[in-house]
Amino acid sequence: MAIRNLVVSRKMWLYGGVFMLAVILIGSAFFLKKQDTAGKAVRAATVKPLVTVRVVRQQDMYSRLVLSGQTVSAAQIDIAPKYTGRLAAVQVELGQAVAAGQVLAVQDTREISLLIAQTAASIRQAKAEMTETKAAFDAGYLQAEADYRRQLTNYQRYESLLNTGAISREAFELVKQQMINAKTAYSVLNDQTMAGGLPAALDIKQALLDKAQYNLELQQQQRDDMILRAPQSGVIGFRQAEPGMMVQAGQKILTVVDNSGIFVDCMVSEQAAATLHTGMNLDMTVESLKRHYPGKIIYISPSSDSKTQIYTIRIVLERSDSALRSGMFAHAAVSVMLSPQTLVVPKQSLVQQNGKNYLFVINDRQQVEQRLVQTGQRSDDSVEILSGIRDGEQVAVTNISRLKPDMKVEVVVESMTEPGGSQRGGGS
């Protein structure tokens, strides 16, 4: 029993010693940490923040604008038949170069050729009938003129005989009536000739002849339209046509692509459109080719799209090669002037508080001054300052969050450079 009490007593002393040792270690660690924190606070209070400053100077303010779009060929013309019919021949292959006026495909023209032959025969018939009618009219006219002159002579002779009493009144009236009838027949034909036009019979025949000739021209034009030709030089970029295939009027069967000139169409915002102008030179990059091409803006849409409020600009690539294709992605970065000779600061130097804009200006004593400023134009990385700072003052551009008014700082001066590294848009 005594031995057991002794063992228990030793364990209690052992546990108590361990506990006391743990308390001492924890207390020591807490004390050392507190001392270290206090030391850091003292050091922080004595160390000045290192601030990079930029000397603000009057300069032109530029904005970096990225123009991107797809290449567009000078022309892409769909070839479609004007009339429904069967293709008799297709004379080009996909990717083949063609010249302006070259025959691409031919529709079956046998039926229209028969109609042309039939109309040509009708014209010959109409001409023959007109010749016959004219001959008959001329003969009738001459006959009527001869009859009238003969009856007039006979009338004049009978009139003399009547005056001498050699004939009766009844005989004279009979001759007079014959003369009047002959005169009427002659006058009808003579009036048609003297009017400057054709006699009625000939006019009808001429109208039939003209109608037949118009039909012939129409049919010949239809046959010509059934021979599909290249409207201009280019390359066959689409082909869905085979001999014997039935095609509908207006159905696209071929496409001629003219890559002799390549354009890039870009969509830009209202703000971007206001800074661009025709004649501006650009360096266009075609991503898939990893090549650069000189370009020039040749068109800016006069109005925006009613739905998207976006403007379209067209850039012509002034030098192209056989590698360029329609539909390739191209882009250019250009610096456009927003404001001439103004004060510009980096965006990160601007601090906003309660809807107002501030800058931290470092004075000659390397002390922080918080300035209320008025801003103007903004670019991707810069802000125009209209008032609040002066030319030549130093503006903090780093460690902004640590700065407070009247704080002393260590200064590293950074030279003011023109914002943006893109090309400037040149003139023509």
Image: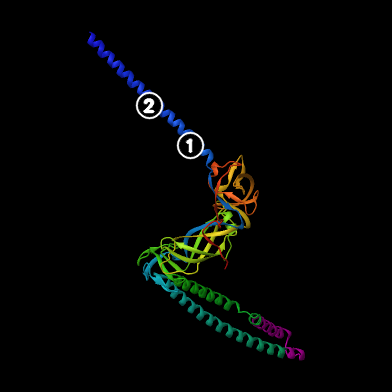
Q: Which residues are magenta?
A: 159-187
Q: Which type of secondary structure does the marked residue at label 1 adopt?
A: helix
Disc number for residue 165: none
For this rendering, which residue is in front, 87 or 53? 53
- Element under disc 2: helix
- Measuring from the top left, give residue 15's x and y in whole percent: 31, 19
Q: Amino acid at mark 1?
A: Lys
Task: Say which amino acid is labelled 2.
Answer: Leu
Residue at (71, 83) in percent of width and height? 173
Residue 403, quarter of the rendered image: top right
Categorize mark 2 by other alpha carbons within 10 Å: few (<14), some (14-19), many (20+).
few
Residue 254 left/right relative to 211: left
Q: Are marks 2 and 1 in contact (CB under 8 Å)?
A: no
Identity of the residue drawn at 48% across and 74% down:
216
Question: Where does label 1 land, which residue?
Answer: 40
Q: Is residue 323 or residue 349 the one in the foreground?
A: 349
Q: Quadrant of the N terminus?
A: top left
Residue 126 locus on image (x, y percent): 51, 78
- Quarter of the image where one finds residue 424: bottom right
Q: In front here: 101 or 425?
A: 425
Viewer-proximal residue among 176 and 283: 283
Q: Is residue 169 magenta?
A: yes
Q: Is residue 109 above or below residue 141?
A: above
In the drawing, what numbered circle is on residue 25?
2
Marks 2 and 1, Cα distance to the nearest angstrom? 23 Å
Q: Main secondary structure of the magenta part?
A: helix
Colour scheme of this structure image? rainbow
Residue 86, relative to residue 207: is it above or below? Answer: above
Residue 223 among magenta residues? no
Task: Check the image and report above or below for 48 versus 245.
Answer: above
- Mark with earlier residue (2, 1): 2
Does the image show residue 292? yes
